[in-house]
Image (cartoon, rainbow, N blue to C red):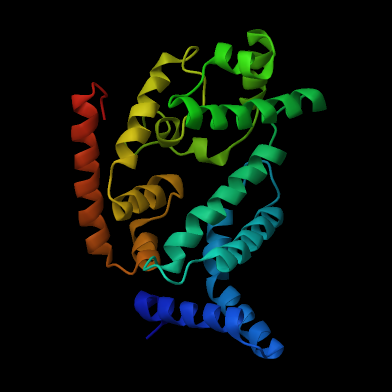
Amino acid sequence: MSALAHPQRSDYRTRELIEIFRTSTDEGERHDALELVTVQHMPLARSLAHRYAGRGLDREDLEQVAFLALLKALQRFDLSKDTEFGAYATPTITGEIRRHFRDHGWLVRPPRELQERRQLVSQTRDRLEQEIGHEPNADELANELDLTPERIREAQVAASNLRPASLDATTSEGSRPVLDLVDARVDTSTDPALDDGILVRTAIRRLPARDQQLVKLRFDADLTQAEIASSMGLSAMQVSRLLRRVLDELRSQLSSAGVTA
């Protein structure tokens, strides 16, 4: 029977190989362990890369980004925790692919100065959100960066010329893209509907760690239930039941906050 049929056995072997790679004093043994564990998880990396193919960037480049992200995940994985490696590696890989899109996936490439300003605004927005407890608007960003609000908005418009593949995926009902709500990073003063995104992200953060991971793998990484089951060491039936419960809980929370789920 294949290793996929026994995800826990597969994860045990993954941990064993990572441990050998990190602790062995035999350089040949370390090399072999890294090669084996990398080959074991290359299908996952390749599958995630292919989800973003056909959106303007070369498939082989996306695969290379995914493979490098896999190596990063192998180096950073915490063996002391119970998380399955596949569940840990998936958001790491998709995050690197998205960053690659942000850097290289322009629909219309603006001047370099505007690209750099967009990046500065993005980094400052993330930092300020942590400091002030809410997503900063254009005026707050302008004050922080000593720029006019118009130049801030110009940088935000430049961001809309990116081709982030994650925004192509819509909810199962065909409504607005899931990640417009889960990972919205737009000035809510120009799009008040995205206030809902803040509520959605807040509701997700309140979930237990495993439930957050389920939501992330299903809607952020866009994995199927079978793929989630394999990466988390669960059965497809367990994943289906858990997702139903988690989504019902989110709908209940969001409904009470006035958001139509």
Q: Residue furthest front?
A: 131
Vertical placement of residue 147 versus 208, above or below? above
Near-viewer residue (38 or 2): 38
| Quadrant position of residue 38 | bottom right
* Residue 92, x across and y down, in percent: 53, 55
Left or right of residue 154, residue 20 in this image:
left
| Quadrant position of residue 261 | top left
| Quadrant position of residue 9 | bottom left
Left or right of residue 210, residue 156 in this image:
right
Residue located at (19% from left, 41% from top): 248
Near-viewer residue (29 or 157): 29
* Residue 78, x across and y down, in percent: 48, 67
* Residue 225, x across and y down, in percent: 33, 57
Residue located at (46% from left, 17% from top): 188
* Residue 100, x across and y down, in percent: 66, 45
> In this view of the protein, can residue 85 be seen by the observer?
yes
Vertical placement of residue 63 versus 109, above or below? below
Number of marks in picture: 0
Residue located at (48% from left, 77% from top): 14
Question: Quarter holding the N terminus?
Answer: bottom left
> In this view of the protein, can residue 111 be seen by the observer?
no
